[in-house]
Amino acid sequence: MVKSRDEPDRDPKIQPPSYRVLGFVYVSIGVLVAVNSFLYTLGILYLPVSTYSLICATQLAFNALFSFFLNSQKFTPYIINSLVLLTISSTLLVFNPESSSNNSTTANPTSKSSYMIGFISTVSAAAVYGLCLSLTQLAFRKVVKQETFKAVLEMLIYQYFVATCVIFIGLFASGDWKHLNQEMKDFKLGKLSYVMTLTWSAITWGLFSVGAVGLIFEVSALFSNSICTVGLTVIPVLATVFFHDRMDGIKVISMVLAIWGFISYIYQHYLDDIELRKKTSRMVSGSEKSDYDAK
C-alpha cells in the first residue's frame, strides 16, 4: 500500500536501530549483491543474450518463494499460475540447442558443460537476486522501520559500497586486474567505447537500483521484481535484432509463457487494488455515517 505524502517522515515513537544492527544488514545484503553480480557475469559469459535474459525471469519465482517465508506474502491462484509459467518458461531453455551455437563467447562454444555452467550460474544469480529483494523489504519492516527517502538512499549507498569493496577484493585477489589493460586494447570498438560502456552501464544500473528499491519502499519486493521482469521478455527480441541471436521455437514458447506469467501476476495486483479501494470506500462511508449520527 502506498503511503500518503502527508504522513510525517519519522515516527518519534519508533527507536532507530543501532549502528551495529544496521551495519550487519548493509554488509550482509552487500555481500549477496556482490555474489549475485559474479554469478550473472558468469552466466552471460557462457550463454547467448536472449537465453540468458529469459532464464533471468526465474528471479520472480524465487522472489515469491522468499517473500512467502520472509515477508508473509500471500499466494493466490493467479500468483501460483504466474510462478508455474515462469518456471516452465526457464526450464524449457535447458533443452535449447543453442548450447552449440556460435553465439557463445566461450573458448569452446560447442561445449555442453559450458552451457550448463552458464545455465546454473544464471539460475543461481536469479535466486540470490530474489533473496536480496526480500531481505531488503524485511530490513525496511523489521530493522529500519522508517520508510523514508533517506532510508532508501542509505540502503542503496551502503550495500552497494560493500558490494563494490568485495568485488574489488576479488578482482585483485584473482589477479584479473593485470589483464584489464589488454582487455581494453582488445575491445573491438576502441578504448573510449570500452570506458563509455562501463561508465553508462554503471549509471543505468544505479538508476535501475534506485527504482527497484523505491518500489520495495512503496509497495513490496515481489511487485518490484514483477515490474523488472517485464523488461526481460523484450531482451530476446532486441538480441535478435542487434546481436543476431537465433529466435527458435523453444525461445518463442519460453517468451510467451514468461509474458503470460507476468500478466497473471499483474492481474492479481489489479484485483488486490480493487479490493483495497472497496475497503477504503466502506471505511470512509462508515466514518461519515458515524459523524452524522454523532451530530
Image (cartoon, rainbow, N blue to C red):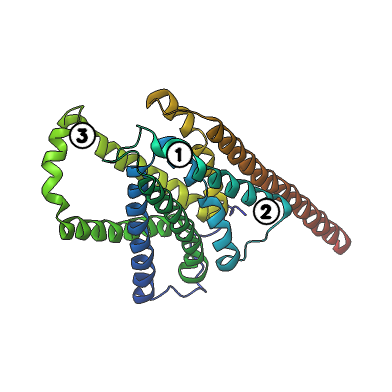
Q: Tag 1 or tag 2, which sits nearer the N-term?
A: 1
Q: Residue 256's quadrant in the figure?
A: top right
Query: In the structure shown, which secondary structural element does the residue marked by tag 1 occupy?
Result: helix
For the point 34% across and 59% down, which residue is it? 35
Q: Position of residue 219 (x, y in %)?
A: 57, 53
Mark 3 surroundings within 10 Å by alpha-carbon count, few (fewer than 14), some (14 through 19), many (20 or more): some
Residue denoted by label 1: 51
User: Looking at the picture, how far across and down is residue 144, in whole percent?
Assistant: 45, 67
x and y, in percent, of residue 277 in the image: 74, 49
Q: Amino acid at mark 1?
A: Thr
Q: Amino acid at mark 2?
A: Ile
**Left or right: residue 145 compared with residue 48:** right
**Circle 2 residues within 10 Å: few <14, some 14–19, many ≥20:** some
Residue 131 percent across, percent down from the top left = 47, 61
Q: Residue at x 46, y 71 (%)?
A: 143
- Dot 2 lies on which element? helix
Q: Which residue is mark 2?
A: 80
Q: Secondary structure at mark 3?
A: helix
Q: Residue furthest right?
A: 293
Instruction: Out of 276 and 59, give the one closest to the viewer.
Output: 59
Residue 249 occupies quadrant: top right
C-alpha span from label 2 to label 3: 43 Å
Q: Is residue 219 visible?
A: no
Q: Earlier in the sequence, mark 1 or mark 3?
A: 1
Quadrant of image for the C terminus: bottom right
Residue at image location 37% in from the left, 61% down from the top: 32
Q: Tag 1: Cα neighbours inside 10 Å, few (<14), some, or many (≥20)?
A: many
What residue is shown with label 3?
Answer: 194
Q: Amino acid at mark 3?
A: Tyr
Is 249 placed above or below 145 here?
A: above
